[in-house]
Amino acid sequence: MTDVRCKPLRMALIGGGGAGFIGKVHATAATLDREAVLVAGALSSNAERSRRAAAEFGISPDRAYGSYQELLENESRRPKDERVNFVSIATPNFTHCEIACAAMEAGFHVVCDKPMTTNLNDAQKMVAAVQDTGRVFALTHNYSGYPLMRQAREMIANGELGEIIAVRATYVQGWMHGMEPGAQQDRGAWKSDPEKNGKAGSLGDVGTHAFHLASFVTGLEPEKLLSGMQSNSDHHELDDYGHAMIRFRQGATGMITWSQVTHGRLNDLSIEVDGTRAALTWRQEEPNQLFVRSLGQPVRIYERDPNAAHASPTAIAACRLPGGHPEAFFEAFANVYRDAFADMRQVDAGESCDLSTSLYPSVQDGYAGVRFMVRCLDSNDLDSQWQSW
């Protein structure tokens, strides 16, 4: 008899059709290791466009659905060995809660794009749904999937940097300068609409990535924060530049900076961590090198190399290629999926599974990201007053 663990998981994609790129990223990352196959989809809020887009993803017409409700209903009726195992959600932020909760209540695991949702009430509903259903929920803060970010996490946990003093995470882009007021956008038009995107503009789009990466790498827990942000673009009124200063319970301080109006920057996410013994630096656009510095010592460069003596277990597990062969965005994204798949298989096999110890971003990480957005917005609205976490 074939071991069910060897069979690819069946995936349904909700959203992600049209000109948007993130749906294709989900489809590519989820299937990269051949642990999953995309078999169903509801790819647009417009039924006709949804069914038409299915062919682009290789989805057969009989599993090309006009809505996520139709998808969940029809897939639930299929025999257990045919229906999808999980759904991936790549829809506007304000729809995440409704779709994710419905999917989990229907018995499906969920992989959701970030931010998890737009407000704390919805975030709490999603936390409760995970607890009530026992389904696996993963959030695609994919930068935590880079091997050297997992290396950095282990180094800090093992005390190699000493006591953490400060962390600075910066995520800056410049694409908004190319937008004309009133012009029709090819993709992501909903991100300018506070009803669909929520009130957090660039804060939600890239600021939450920087916040999550800082939390993931250091393990620090916020105590309070102070934030200021501004809108420089004529095409919307949401924030496109901002900072948040964080005081952590462990005594360290943090600075999160986000921008989508910094000329010449493409996708420049970076993190610096200062400890009492050493400091480290990493940039997403040069993801295969991690720099570690100590006073009076030569700079140490940790390269993404699964065969190197310095490589940590989680970094090795996140690598697919030998050192010197660059790995980047798709592979990091796929690591989130691969880690979630391990838990999905364990849960589906009826085995005990401690989801709190998993490396992939969880519903609790999603809740923390929403809280970060809300506290930043509150602080900014109150003329940059400190807000308790």
Image (tube, grey):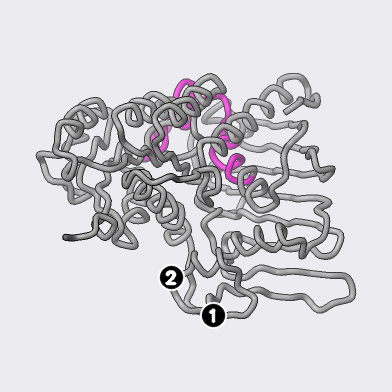
Q: Quadrant of the N terminus?
A: bottom left
Q: Residue furthest right?
A: 296
Residue flagged by tag 2: what amino acid is it?
A: Arg
Reading the image, the residue beneath label 1 is: 307
**How far separated are the C-alphas under marks 2 and 1?**
11 Å
Q: Is residue 339 left or right of residue 280?
A: left
Residue 373 lies in what quarter of the image? top right
Per the rendering, the mark at residue 274 is: none
Mark 2 or 1 closer to N-term? 1
Q: Is residue 28 left or right of residue 378?
A: left
Report the span colored magenta: 182-210
Pick the residue in front: 280 or 311.
311
How would you rate the neighbour count of disc 1 (Cα within 10 Å): few for under 14, some for 14-19, many for 20 or more?
A: few
Q: Quadrant of the C terminus?
A: top right
Per the rendering, the mark at residue 320 is: 2
Pick the residue in front: 3 or 123.
3
**SS of the residue under disc 2:** loop
Residue flagged by tag 1: what amino acid is it?
A: Asn
**SS of the residue under disc 1:** loop
